[in-house]
Amino acid sequence: MFMLQIVLASLCLAAPSPDAGVLTSARVLDESSPSDWRRVDPSNTLYLDLPGGRVVIELAAGFAPAHVENIRTLAREHYFDDLAILRSQDNYVAQWGDPNADDRTNAGDRAHAKSLGSARTKLPAEFSRPSQGLAFTKLSDGDVYTREVGWADGFPVGRDPGTGQIWLAHCYGIVGAGRNNPADSSNGAELYVVTGHSPRHLDRNITAVGRVLQGMELLSSLPRGTGALGFYEKPQQRVPLKRVMLASAISAADRTEWEALRTDTPTFQQWVEARRNRREPWFVYPVGHVELCNVPLPARELKKPAH
Amino acid sequence: MFMLQIVLASLCLAAPSPDAGVLTSARVLDESSPSDWRRVDPSNTLYLDLPGGRVVIELAAGFAPAHVENIRTLAREHYFDDLAILRSQDNYVAQWGDPNADDRTNAGDRAHAKSLGSARTKLPAEFSRPSQGLAFTKLSDGDVYTREVGWADGFPVGRDPGTGQIWLAHCYGIVGAGRNNPADSSNGAELYVVTGHSPRHLDRNITAVGRVLQGMELLSSLPRGTGALGFYEKPQQRVPLKRVMLASAISAADRTEWEALRTDTPTFQQWVEARRNRREPWFVYPVGHVELCNVPLPARELKKPAH
């Protein structure tokens, strides 16, 4: 199987054409097999229900275990329900949490901050972790920011063979835990999502906790706030969070289940190659290179078996 | 002046701190002198008036002269007025034009396409141009997509010393001319703007014509279309263009004038350095690298003299 796919890719490189044999992204997905996909663990699947619909986030428990555990506790205890999206800064991030938890908006009232319940109020910074023991798929195209980039556990990552550390790369759709100036000032109660050109300067400066699998457009199309850092200046401009919950907290019959394209397979290499050398007839120049954050990571809802 | 600034930057590199002497982006702008800015030519300044406000675009006459001249003609003859934004695809582009000019939406009716007036119906592809004669400020951090990147004429560019060609780089906020499969099928009557992670694979595959100076949030926050390629499926979902005009077509008293930070000065080098090594107290790790599309290009409205 592996050999066959590599041969196919080589033929395509030698003779690009819009024919059926050509390795386009669409064709790679069409021809993927069930084993090219992994089921997203319901205990790592966070639903964010907004007035406009549902955002589905995969939590990166392998990269930020303390934050993910705290987010699970907060969701289980309904901490986020009825809080709001507080900030939308163009070409950067949207952010949600408790408007009273922080005084950056000048509207907060810490005395009225919502209790974190049994969640921890203080967590360690989880900016990176040892790479040992984590399968790493390297992107051969290089990177401006760091020595090695690629994918691990289905997430885009940077890796430094010198320090032996690995970390989530701030690509479009990555979710992280907002913090103040101290490195360990995040607790997972305030989260942001990248909605613009990937701010890779945040890598290793903040704890990333996951990525959006579906519903990104509900976050990226929010009106931008006109206050400093894109905070909404009036409380009525904030977008309410109707409900935030873990898929594992819902009965299997009611939840939606997700699967994501595995990043450690020959099919995924084909997927990257199809993005590196564009074979769709529209392209005049096939490009020949691809940047980490320009490789989308496909996810799809699992169909429920019919009754 | 040049020497002094370099010395200042070196001191900052040696001793990062949140003190007043530190080279942050904010400080570079605060200390810039009038000669660090260039006035944007009103004949290259395109206003796009949407229901939510004005978008200001600087046309790149030096890179796409035939397209820019056609866009000037179309604007002068009110071609775009009362047309609409037809498409908003998440993490990619928003696009405007005549819904009847093309049949990709299945809603178009070419028999009712709006006349291009005295504009040309056919233009050459302007994917790149010779770099000779164009001042180029190189970014030393490298690039995944091409051999050299940097800035020319105030725009982000790629350059290939081998071919002697230079081209606009598809960073967030870049505006281009939509085309069908033939390379020379764009005429400037259908334009798009990049609203997501910079799709650098479009470089040298399509004619870029300018960049948004102001009002980007009006385009990036549009609801995403649910049709293929993000086209709006129902005509009433389209966002109307109230009026599109060149600043030079308006009396000087009525127009707003813009200036942009020059990209060929020691101050601009400081600006890039402030983005490469982040000295704001929030940053734990100063990064040490910066990608072309993560360097914002400041622009500001010129205050009119008081009466």
Image (cartoon, coloured by chain):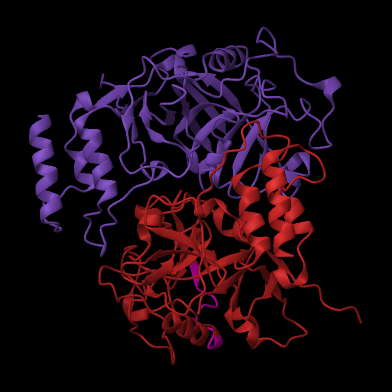
Chain colours: A red, B purple
Q: Residue at x 8, y 40 (%)?
A: B7
Q: Is residue B57 visible?
A: no
Q: Is residue B139 left or right of residue B199?
A: left
From the top left corner, tell me how far across and down residue A223 is, in percent: 52, 51
Closer-to-camera residue (B79/B287) = B287
Q: Residue furthest top?
A: B118
Q: Please indicate, yes or no, whether residue A19 appears anywhere in the rendered image.
A: yes
Which residues are drawn in magenta?
Answer: A76-84
Q: Nearer the viewer, residue A190 or B181?
A: B181
Residue A78 lies within the magenta run:
yes
A50 inside magenta stretch: no
Image location of residue B274, percent across then percent down: 24, 46
Residue at screen point 79% across, 27% down: B100
**Is B92 positioned to the left or the right of B113 in the image?**
left
* Image location of residue B193, percent across then percent down: 56, 36
> Is residue B290 left or right of B203 when viewed as pictured?
left
